[in-house]
Image: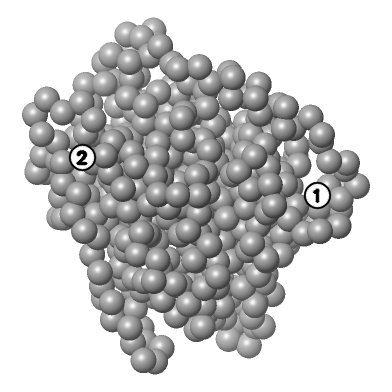
């Protein structure tokens, strides 16, 4: 475990945060931030775009076992990090999780963009850079995590694949990462369990076989997979094989349906009853620079029902989730507190290498880290803002603008229940 540094570091940050006055200018600052988000002149796609060709109902695997059961063969319980502890070791008091948004490290279904990018940027842009090198700048942000959760915003595999998009479509994009990406994701945090969420709108871009190969490559590399079905992905940390449970939802073909709130409540409550520490990943909502606000209603984007993120998140938290990790809008969104739980409505783009628009605010992302106690409550949390530069070079954002942006959006969208983000990224949500 490398939790002690993280634990003590957060404790120190939290103490200093309590001594800091609130920033009365932050609300006004948002208008400046948003005003700076003028439409880009680039003609690049805004970001991984929605599937508009085949939107089938999400699978509805519903085993509803009566007693604790092992995960099915396609979602094995993952003894990802037994660590040096012995069977006699005590259960961890706190589990430290760090989560990021969308990750896509190259696309072997289309490499033509790299030629155009090379001309535009005035330098040779490889279609497939070393994935370890792409991820390396982010490693320090998750070095103290026990568990790292990322949204895998593309299939993983190689070889022939069925065409996802209709000829001539301008709103359909198909993404598949080379297999080498899976190992690089595992090496991002070699001392932690790494979990990849595949409940999103691009995990099936290479068809159902590509969806299967994505999970196979991730698991073969030691990355646990969540979002395949409704059973929680169990992560072993220390002596227990089920220290923490992770569930993935989306409003797309891949993963349980985030719009079916009664099912969401059922799945999360079942996991909470058995494992207590539950983290929920969700891919939903509208996309782009006009999607920074979190509406309390169903979002329609490109004619698709992208779900009601507030209703979803509240259902998950009320059923026992400690953390809701949102992604999909490709921009940062608000952070809400609900009791001892935290809802990150969107962590934006973490690392999306390719022909994407990386103008403000699409270039901003964040890694959210939180410690969860044995009762399934968030004990402390911190945000690490990140920034991307074309064609997808991510690094810590030294300006920390993402922290201010999330703080401002939180107060705008959730004036009664906003969690506050200090300039150094410390999250405060309890009353003083
Ligand atoms: Zn997406």
Q: Secondary structure at mark 1?
A: helix
**Marks 2 and 1, Cα distance to the nearest angstrom?**
45 Å
What is the tally of numbered marks visible in this picture?
Answer: 2
Question: Which residue sits furthest front?
Answer: 297
Q: Residue at x 75, y 52 (%)?
A: 428
Residue at x 36% of width, y 9% of height: 120
Would you call the spot at circle 2 few (<14 residues within 10 Å), some (14-19), or many (20 or more)? some
Label 2 or label 1, whichever comes before in sequence order:
1
Q: Residue at x 55, y 70 (%)?
A: 318
Q: Is residue 211 above or below residue 124?
A: below
In the picture of the structure, the residue carrying the numbered disc 2 is 52
Q: Residue furthest bottom?
A: 67
Does residue 56 appear to the left or right of 227 in the view shown? Answer: left
Q: Find disc 1 in the rendering and name its residue.
A: 13
Q: Nearer the viewer, residue 393 or 328?
A: 328
Which quarter of the picture shows residue 45?
top left
């Amino acid at each position: 475990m490398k939790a002690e540094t993280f634990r003590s570091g957060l404790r120190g940050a939290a103490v200093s945060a309590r001594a800091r006055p609130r920033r009365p200018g932050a609300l006004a600052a948002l208008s400046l931030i948003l005003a700076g988000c003028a439409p880009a002149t680039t003609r690049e796609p805004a970001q991984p775009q929605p599937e508009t060709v085949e939107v089938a109902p999400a699978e509805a695997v519903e085993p509803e076992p009566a007693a604790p059961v092992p995960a099915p063969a396609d979602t094995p319980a993952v003894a990802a990090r037994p660590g040096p502890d012995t069977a006699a070791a005590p259960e961890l008091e706190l589990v430290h999780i760090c989560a990021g948004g969308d990750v896509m490290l190259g696309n072997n279904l289309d490499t033509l963009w790299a030629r155009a990018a090379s001309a535009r940027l005035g330098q040779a842009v490889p279609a497939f850079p070393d994935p370890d090198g792409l991820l390396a700048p982010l490693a320090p942000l998750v070095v103290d995590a026990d568990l790292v959760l990322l949204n895998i915003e593309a299939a993983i595999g190689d070889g022939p694949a069925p065409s996802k998009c209709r000829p001539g479509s301008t709103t359909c994009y198909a993404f598949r990462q080379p297999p080498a990406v899976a190992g690089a994701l595992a090496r991002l945090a070699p001392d932690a369990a790494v979990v990849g969420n595949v409940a999103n709108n691009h995990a099936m871009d290479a068809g159902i076989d590509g969806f299967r190969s994505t999970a196979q490559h991730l698991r073969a590399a030691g990355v646990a997979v969540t979002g395949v079905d409704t059973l929680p992905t169990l992560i072993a940390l220390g002596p227990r094989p089920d220290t923490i449970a992770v569930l993935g939802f989306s409003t797309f073909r891949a993963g349980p349906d985030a719009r079916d709130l009664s099912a969401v409540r059922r799945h999360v409550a079942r996991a909470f009853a058995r494992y207590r520490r539950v983290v929920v990943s969700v891919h939903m909502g509208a996309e782009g620079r006009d999607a920074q606000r979190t509406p309390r209603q169903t979002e329609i984007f490109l004619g698709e029902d992208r779900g009601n993120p507030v209703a979803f998140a509240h259902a998950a938290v009320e059923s026992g989730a400690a953390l809701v990790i949102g992604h999909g809008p490709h921009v940062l969104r608000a952070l809400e507190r609900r009791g001892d739980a935290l809802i990150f409505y969107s962590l934006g783009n973490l690392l999306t290498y390719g022909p994407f628009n990386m103008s403000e605010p699409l270039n901003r992302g964040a890694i959210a880290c939180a410690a969860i106690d044995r009762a399934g409550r968030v004990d402390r949390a911190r945000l690490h803002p990140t920034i991307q530069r074309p064609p997808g070079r991510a690094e810590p954002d030294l300006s920390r603008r993402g922290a201010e942006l999330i703080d401002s959006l939180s107060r705008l969208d959730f004036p009664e229940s906003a969690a506050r983000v200090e300039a150094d990224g410390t999250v405060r949500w309890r009353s003083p």
